[in-house]
Image (cartoon, rainbow, N blue to C red):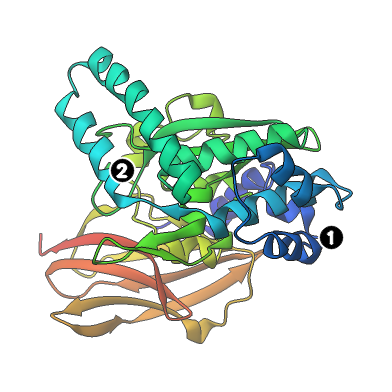
Amino acid sequence: MKTSIYILLLILIHNSLFAQVSDFKSIDFTKADNIAKLNKNAPIDNLPLLAYNLTHKLSTKVEKFRAIYSWVCHNIKGDNTQHTKVNNKRKKLKEDSISFMKWNNSYKKIAFKKLRTHKRTMCTGYAYLIKELCYLAEIESVIIDGYGRSIDSNINELEIQNHSWNAVKLNKKWYLCDATWSSGYMNVYNRFVNEYNDGYFLTDPILFGKNHFPSEQKWSFDKDLTALAFVRAPMVYGETFEHKITPLIPKKLDLSIHKDDEIKFGFKTSNTILNKNISLIYYIGNEEKKLKIYNIRNENNIISFNCTFKNKGTYDTHLKINGDIVATYTIKVRIS
């Protein structure tokens, strides 16, 4: 179960070839974000005017895109009713894709009317707005359809295509983003909470691929990402993206080991993380228990550590960074 730091460094070098927000670390997005705020609650019945107001005072395409992205994320609300209705119909017609497409094309008229009048939508509406506003601002963007992975979807196998996001072309390179998951989340009462998550803006494709799998492989930007690797990977969360944590090892959600086996954990981060803010935990009921970690190393923004499992049992093991759970593994420890 041991993995060397050398292999982790090779992964880092491989990752650095991908387009991500760090390409624009010299850009200050304050002006773009402020323009988006100044246009808060602007109507969307005149998209050319909205695109102009958001972008005409900005000089670079990445700043213009930032203003568009920020405005959409802060002004459009998620609609769980629509999402549930489409998902239920998709499941019902899983074996009849033609009938689903006919129904979906008809339902889109209703969905887009609700978007225009109430600024409420699901992922396709977010992706559509990003694409249209980009087009009006002369920025190339496409809608990507595929599979979104969460605690209740696309676990162990690809179930149904259930999500849409965007790719945007800036400085002759393609970048990935997800305005839906940037905008907020549904709480336990299925009510939308508008809470911006910047981690889905021009995300590192390796991290993006932890919970996004496109139906067209060319849009993953990670040629090593397969459907099998996607559904077997550790669980990640919105906080993973907020902290810009890319779990590297172990690569699987479900692990089976022997008692006293040592496991190496490793993740990449662009942020400064103190050793005291890294922990590996599990729960007994509501009580949080810490596992002992050791040999913590930080080399070129890749942090690794070891943990030995001394007792038989099944552990839902969580990597915790700065107080937030960012990755989950299920580790079955057996005696022989």
* Residue bearing the label numbered 1: 26
Element type at marker 1? loop
Instruction: Work out whether 86 lies above or below 64.
Output: above
Q: Position of residue 256 (x, y in %)?
A: 20, 55
* Residue bearing the label numbered 2: 82
Q: In this rendering, which labeled residue sits more in front, label 2 or label 1?
A: 2
Q: Position of residue 285 (x, y in %)?
A: 13, 80
Which image quarter is the C terminus in? bottom left
Residue 102 position by quadrant = top left
Nearer-the-camera pick, 180 or 273: 180
- Whether residue 209 is visible: no
Q: Position of residue 158 (x, y in %)?
A: 28, 34
Mark 1 residue crowding within 10 angstroms, few (<14) / some (14–19) / many (20+): few
Q: Residue at x 48, y 80 (%)?
A: 322
Most distant residue in the top direction: 98
Left or right: 58 as drawn, with respect to 221: right
Residues at marks 2 and 1, CA–CA distance in whole angstroms: 40 Å
Q: Amino acid at mark 1?
A: Ser
- Whether residue 318 is visible: yes
